[in-house]
Amino acid sequence: MKPRGSIGEVWDIFFRSYKYFQMLSKFGDIPWVEHALTEESPELYGKRDSRDLVASNILSNLKYAETHIGSNIEADGKNTINMYVVKALISRFALFEGTWRKYHGLSGADTYLEECA
């Protein structure tokens, strides 16, 4: 098990957020799961969570990754997830979610649109 706050955990959070962003854009409301599931997990047959919950969790996870991931490209290498990659995904996600909310008449569009700048 990785210690809390390790770079592996931050990468896990980044990639989970990326995958949830893809699923949110494709399916809308989806179940939000933050732990590994087994074959007997009741979450496998659970209800969908609201778009508000999923989008706010994606954004908060990306903000966590932004503050806890390194930004030293020379030491980490060019092909490593770093702070700038996380910022790019925050911008892409926030722009998508903000415009989706604005044109579908949902509240909270300004929160995401301000975050993408």
Image (tube, rainbow, N blue to C red):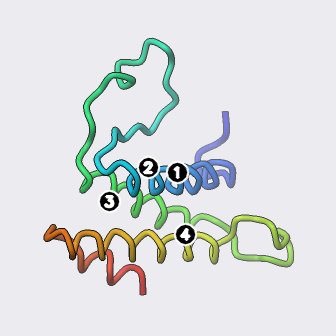
Give the quarter of the figure containing the C terminus: bottom left
Of label 4 and label 3, which has the lower sequence position?
3
The answer to whether marks 2 and 1 mark residues whose Cβ atoms lie closer than 8 Å is yes
| Residue 69 position within the rendered picture, expressed as x and y whole percent measured from the top left | 64, 65
Question: Which label belongs to residue 19?
Answer: 1
Quarter location, residue 49: top left
Question: Which label belongs to residue 81?
Answer: none
Of label 4 and label 2, which has the lower sequence position?
2
Q: Is residue 16 above or below residue 33?
A: below
Q: Residues within 10 Å of mark 1 (few under 14, many from 20)?
A: few
Q: CA distance from mark 4 to mark 2?
A: 24 Å
Which is more foreground, mark 4 or mark 1?
Answer: 1
Label 2 sits on a secondary structure element that is helix
| Residue 8 position within the rendered picture, expressed as x and y whole percent measured from the top left | 68, 49
Label 4 sits on a secondary structure element that is helix
Which is more foreground, mark 1 or mark 3?
Answer: 1
Amino acid type, mark 2? Met
Q: Is residue 100 left or right of residue 117?
A: left
Q: CA distance from mark 4 to mark 3?
A: 17 Å
Amino acid type, mark 1? Lys
In the picture of the structure, the residue carrying the numbered disc 3 is: 56
Amino acid type, mark 3? Ser
Q: Is residue 108 above or below residue 40?
A: below
In the picture of the structure, the residue carrying the numbered disc 2 is: 23
Which residue is painted at 57% across and 57% down in the image? 14
Quarter location, residue 82: bottom right
Question: Which label belongs to residue 67?
Answer: 4
Q: Residues within 10 Å of mark 3 (few under 14, many from 20)?
A: some
Q: CA distance from mark 4 to mark 1?
A: 20 Å
